[in-house]
Image (cartoon, rainbow, N blue to C red):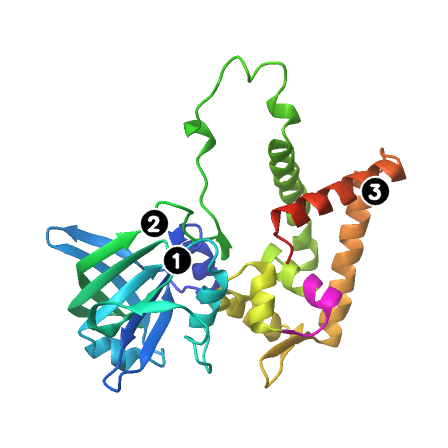
Amino acid sequence: MNFDARDFRRALGKFATGVTVVTTRNASGENLGVTASSFNAVSMDPPLILWSIDKGAHSLATYQVAEHFVVNVLSNAQVDISNRFASRGEDKFANITFEEGVGGAAKITDAAAHFECRTWNVYEGGDHLIIVGEVVRYAYRDAGSALVFHNGRYAVPEPHPMLLPVNEQSSLNGRLGKHLLYLMREALAAYRGDFYPRLASLGVNDNEWRVLTLLADRGVLGVEDLARSVAQPIADLNDTLNGLQERALVVLANDGSVLLSEAGETLALRLLAMADDYEQRLFESLEPTEISTIKSGLGRVIERLGTTA
């Protein structure tokens, strides 16, 4: 069976994982780090973990012979760190606070957990190398939560609704139906379920929709800024951009910036017109003052939560 690599990655993205930065130090004493979501427990006795590195990675040779490495499990506040270590051509450790772990490998400050490892073995794994490490020290923080990767985007973990304690008496009289968080989640789920399938009529998926409309709205953006704004890891954003580039919808400039082609701008404007029309029909039963109140209120909630892009 022949696999479309981009579609295969999309299928794998249905399996939610954590996000890590694996660090080591080379023979010259230089700190190295790479973002990896391929981290897994292997054994409790002895305590073994594994991760894998692309054979095309610039730092492959160092990790292949490294005696020690540290797996830094990123917190949900460390999206920028994940994107930085997934990119090339910069001092990845600039302005990042860390301390030395086993073998001098960096332990990134405020990570959700650290696993300091001695390399146990390295195995062939197709276009990757599988690196197994024996954990010699570990630590974790109870406060906060870890960064999650799911459906090609960053996410954060939260308790499953079925596991939350319920006060039966206080749940009566429609309390849930009036709760802001519940209403926002239900509205977003309904929007995605009704609007996203319509994108197929113009030949795009939801990730491509976010990229095209953001570029139309904000103009030329660097890959890192774009990744942050659409909440996609750089590796997955690159897949999205490659697909758009193959269809001549975006242009990747030599300086790393991304801009719409003429065809891309035409399509993005059609997508925005579709969104405007959808919103107009969605709100047709509301008065203009009610619509304004909803939008301004949500804007204030977003500002209060500090989640503006």
Labels 3, 1: front one: 1
Q: Is residue 14 above or below residue 83?
A: above
Real-space Cα separation, disc 3 to disc 2, in angstroms: 42 Å
Real-space Cα separation, disc 3 to disc 1, in angstroms: 40 Å
Return the residue at label 1: 110
**For numbered disc 1, what is the local secondary structure?**
loop
For the magenta stretch, what is the residue range?
213-221
**For numbered disc 2, what is the local secondary structure?**
loop
Q: Of the residues shown, which amino acid type is indicated by label 3?
A: Ser
The front one of 248 and 147 is 147
Return the residue at label 3: 292
Quarter of the image where one finds residue 103: bottom left
- Percent across and percent down for residue 254 are 59, 86
Q: Are marks 2 and 1 in contact (CB under 8 Å)?
A: yes
Q: Of the residues shown, which amino acid type is indicated by label 2?
A: Arg
Furthest residue toward right: 288
Point 74% across, 58% down: residue = 271
Q: Is residue 140 above or below residue 126?
A: above
Point 29% across, 58% down: residue = 114
| Rendered image: mark on residue 221 | none
| Rendered image: mark on residue 141 | 2
The front one of 93 and 205 is 93
Of the 4 image quadrants, the one containing the C terminus is bottom right
Q: Are marks 3 and 2 in contact (CB under 8 Å)?
A: no
